[in-house]
Image (cartoon, grey):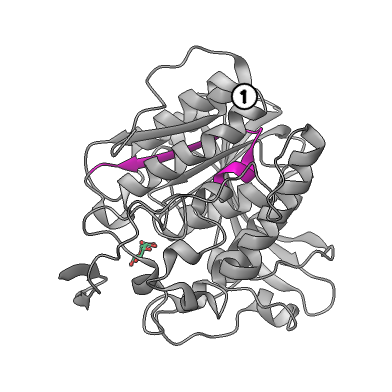
Amino acid sequence: MLFSVLCVASVVVLAASEPPAVSTAPFPDPLVFENGEPVETQEDWQTRRAEMRDLMLRNQYGAIPSAPVPVRLAETLAEETQNNGATLFRTVRLAVGAENAFPVRVEMYLPAGGAGPYPAILRVGLGCPVVQEINERGYIFACYENQDFDFDTLGNDKIGPAQAMFPDCDWGSLAAWAWGASRVLDYLLTLPEVDPQRVVITGHSRTGKTALLAGALDERFALVVPNGSGCGGAAAYRRYGPECETLELITRPSRFASWFHKDFRRFADKEPELPFDQHFLRALVAPRPVLSTDALGDLWANPIGTAAACRAAQPVFEFLGVSENNAMHFREGKHDQLPEDYRVLLDFADHHFFGKPLTCTYGEGPGEK
Ligand code: GTR
């Protein structure tokens, strides 16, 4: 079976192994400890959550440094009003680290004319098609250059600035970018314009994977919205839909092995042996709300697998008494983070932050129920 993948200007044809016979493998139970004991209390859940976090980092993403690192504003590069006065645009350069600090570019689009504090959407990676609308709805949009933390290389991995700062840490790019989201959040939380209780983390595709990881690990993110995140993000390894990216494909040395822990590829074609699946990552967000936004035609990102992982995480949200906080949304169309996806995000955020009514269904997805 062949998959064709459009890659920048050239077409890369990947020879995939036959679809692995994993489609009905049971999901590990997030409410049962590794020693077989059930999770019965809130306290048990906290312990189990730490166990799950450790399993995912140790096997898939690599360790994330726990030592605090100073983050300071090095320079304001630009500040101007945009969008007919709706937006105050500001670009800054942060310095991350004490000695040998490295620079990180952050772009912020603030509602102009008020003082805030405003809820904020932090996006992994630069760019957004609906900044004006976001500002007019009373939200800040901020984004950062994730490659300032680690380079995004296809095949030839290069040690990035964050990894150079922590040479003993065995993390891949996704973990470095997610750690970067937390460092940018450190800075955002120093700004009087930002409402510290209402920061959303989002991203698309590889940066959607990063957003889910960052939101799972850092509880200061109040709402977590991975878009089109697929393999290594919101999609389950045990439920491959047609033409989707698999663990074997994504961890090829010539592809994206460097996004992950260096030994993750040992699970290629052995998905049932994974001591976790991506529903664990989603469950780590609980009790906070998580919303995956995806496209039904984005087969490479495995919409069936994302819906399956969402359902498999649901018992944790039920257990914590927040059944509505585990949400998924699928639109028609292809792989992108469109204005429609941002509107779904904003409506969901308005609901959770300000009690506004939901505008669409957030619980339905493809595949077996
Ligand atoms: C693809 C990769 C996906 C996704 C995508 C992107 O080539 O296979 O996992 O991350 O890139 O980030 O655009």
Name the one closer to the observer, 352 or 29: 29
**Residue depicted at 50% across the width and 52% down the height:** 278
User: In the image, 110: left or right of 117?
Assistant: left
Let me know if residue 294 is in the magenta part.
yes
**Residue depicted at 37% across the width and 71% down the height:** 269
Percent coordinates x, y for residue 321 in the rendering: 65, 23
Question: Where on the picture, by quarter, is residue 30?
Answer: top right
Name the one closer to the observer, 179 or 51: 51
Let me know if residue 248 is in the magenta part.
no
Ligand 1 position by quadrant: bottom left
Percent coordinates x, y for residue 322 in the rendering: 62, 24
Secondary structure beneath label 1: loop
Percent coordinates x, y for residue 1 in the rendering: 15, 70
- Can residue 188 be seen from the camera position used here? yes
* Residue under label 1: 322
Of all residues shown, which one is farthest toward the left? 1
**Residue depicted at 38% across the width and 40% down the height:** 307
Q: Is residue 119 above or below residue 253?
A: above
Tell me the amino acid under the disc marked 1: Val
